Amino acid sequence: MTAAARKSVHKPSADLSAHVDALDWPQITTELDGQGCAVLKGLLTPDQCLAIAALYPDDAHFRSRIVMGRHGFGRGEYKYFAYPLPDLIAQLRPALYAHLQAVANRWNEAMGIDIRYPQEHASFLKRCHEAGQARPTPLLLQYEAGDYNCLHQDLYGEHVFPLQVAILLSEPGRDFTGGEFVLTEQRPRMQSRAEVVPLAQGDAVAFAVHHRPMQGTRGTYRVNLRHGVSRIRSGQRHTLGVIFHDAK
């Protein structure tokens, strides 16, 4: 790992929060409302991507390792970060939450769900921890050729923030082939719809964890979403998952 890469993950940066704030949030919000997902172009730099991916072999950063094949989740593996989170991730989580919180509240209101989310991520985490959800959920995923991630939802307890973010740390075509991010949407009394989201290194996709509202001819209804990763054809793929609720 280069010196710049080490610095980018282990030292907080005011530039990161400013960079998140400078994203085109009106467009991101429009895409989330229309498709249930939105791409955040260039969220991380190549050095930041390299630095996070390079943490994977060092178990000191993580609380647990999951081998997907043992649980029927697919093929590949991932590790959940331990608290305290690496500085970059600890800063990225509340910075993204600050912009997604309004979307989450508006979605819940549209779906007739009484839960509302506070403006600050720390306040929401306090709610999770008081309910016994105190284990951190940001995770680092590693895939090799032939690996894949089955369609699923990241629900870890009673308190669920309805949006999450996945950041591609590897470069498609150079580090790996295949391995596309896939989102499916199950609509009442209709066939499911699939969305394949192309990402470059450092791009992120924000997407619905479980449900999102959709406007129909008879009003608003809920659609159910799942996400996964298609088969890796060659190489190695790393992804950072940023989930805003903690786990029991």
Image (tube, rainbow, N blue to C red):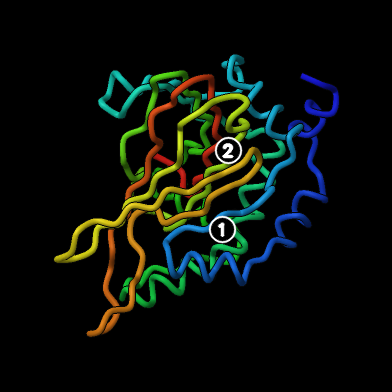
- The type of residue carrying mark 1 is Ser
Of 211 and 215, nearer the camera is: 215
In the drawing, does residue 228 fall left or right of residue 205?
left
Q: Identify whether 36 is placed above or below 66.
A: below
Of 248 and 58, nearer the camera is: 58
Residue located 51% across and 28% down the image: 177
**Residue 128's spot in the image, x, y percent?**
45, 50
- Residue 168 is marked as 2
**Residue 69's spot in the image, x, y percent?**
31, 20
Quadrant of the image occupied by residue 28: bottom right
Q: Residue furthest bottom?
A: 218
In the drawing, does residue 135 fall left or right of residue 93?
left
- Helix or strand or loop: what does disc 2 sit on? strand
- Helix or strand or loop: what does disc 1 sit on? helix
- Residue 123 is marked as 1
Q: Nearer the viewer, mark 1 or mark 2?
A: 2
In the rendered image, which quarter contains the N terminus? top right
Residue located 81% across and 44% down the image: 13
